[in-house]
Image: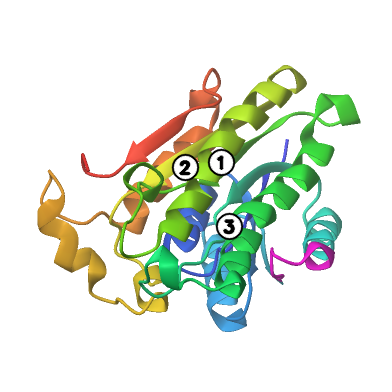
């Protein structure tokens, strides 16, 4: 049976690492991206080189119409979805809550929370035995920020990831009897490009001494946790939030 996986925000960082590791574990992969088509296609090419099918599909998860087109493309080109990694997410520049604009907050929650909800909705409609599906698994990307709050930097991002933790718990219980497992990973300080997008390219390295393991993590280390949660080895695991934080 073919196993088709959609990874949102799959053109770089944790998403790209997850695509490559999932391919080695036998998944065909749809690599979603927002802007960088060349990077997404490069990831898809690496998946194909590993012997699996892959497509790169543009869509902004904050736009429902684009999400619907994304899932329709996966249906048509790869077949019925069996896995979803809700990885797409944004940060913003460091700022206190008393300086945050409504536009900033709306963007943060539109991408990080509503986008994850809508993608999960579409995945459940395809996977659930209630809807004639054959089951599947969803992994949401949270963050250690959900526990730490990120004061003075991005409380909005931390709050959006706190919402993902609650969403994971609720959805897991909602669809557990319908053949779908829902879990999350909570990365800590990971060396990816997301820090630069928030205006702090050296943030992970600068904060590394605050981590009990005294180092940052890698995208590959997070991907290993995600792919395990996607696998049959995690067949009795649902509603879990796995910290991959070096003890932070």
Q: Residue 247 carries which label?
A: none
Please report whichever mark, 2 or 1, sits nearer to the chain's N-terminal start: 1
Residue at left 55%, top 72%? 104
Toward the viewer: 146 or 194?
Answer: 146
Q: Is residue 24 visible?
A: no
Q: How far apart are marks 2 and 3 (CA)?
A: 18 Å
Q: Name the residue under label 1.
A: 139
Q: Distance between the residues labelled 3 and 1?
A: 14 Å
Toward the viewer: 227 or 105?
Answer: 105
Q: Is mark 3 on a helix, strand or loop?
A: helix
User: Which of the two marks, 2 or 3, is nearer to us in this view?
Assistant: 3
Residue at left 68%, top 54%? 114
Q: Against 125, is 36 above or below? A: below
Whole-percent x, y for residue 119 in the image:
72, 51
Q: Distance between the residues labelled 2 and 1?
A: 7 Å
Whole-percent x, y for residue 61 in the image:
69, 63
Q: In this view, does 42 lie to the left or right of 189?
A: right
Which residue is at the far front? 98
Q: Against 188, is 103 above or below? A: below
Whole-percent x, y for residue 193 in the image:
38, 72
Residue 182: quarter of image: top right
Q: Is residue 202 magenta?
A: no
Question: What are the residue bounds of the magenta stretch?
Answer: 58-66
Q: Which mark is residue 226?
A: 2
Q: Is residue 245 left or right of residue 147?
A: left
How many residues crowd around disc 2 within 10 Å: few (fewer than 14), some, or many (20 or more)?
Answer: many
């Amino acid at each position: 049976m073919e196993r088709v996986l959609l990874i949102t925000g799959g053109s770089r960082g944790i998403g790209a690492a997850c695509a490559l590791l999932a391919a080695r574990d036998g998944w065909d992969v749809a690599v979603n991206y927002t802007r960088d088509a060349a990077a997404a296609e490069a990831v898809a090419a690496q998946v194909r080189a590993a012997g699996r099918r892959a497509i790169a599909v543009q869509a902004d998860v904050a736009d429902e119409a684009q999400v619907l087109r994304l899932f329709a493309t996966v249906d048509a080109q790869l077949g019925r979805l069996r896995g979803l990694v809700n990885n797409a997410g944004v940060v913003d520049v460091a700022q206190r809550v008393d300086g945050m604009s409504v536009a900033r907050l709306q963007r943060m929650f539109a991408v990080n929370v509503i986008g994850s909800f809508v993608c999960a909705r579409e995945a459940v409609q395809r996977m659930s035995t209630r809807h004639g599906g054959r089951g599947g698994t969803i992994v949401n990307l949270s963050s250690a920020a959900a526990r730490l709050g990120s004061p003075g930097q991005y409380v909005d991002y931390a709050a959006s990831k706190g919402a993902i933790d609650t969403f994971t718990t609720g959805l897991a219980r909602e669809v557990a009897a319908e053949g779908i497992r829902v879990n999350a990973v909570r990365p800590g300080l990971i060396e990816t490009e997301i820090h630069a997008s928030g205006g702090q390219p050296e943030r992970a390295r600068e904060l590394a001494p605050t981590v009990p393991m005294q180092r940052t993590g890698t995208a590959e280390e997070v991907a290993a946790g995600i792919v395990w949660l996607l696998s049959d080895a995690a067949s009795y695991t649902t509603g879990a939030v796995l910290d991959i934080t070096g003890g932070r």
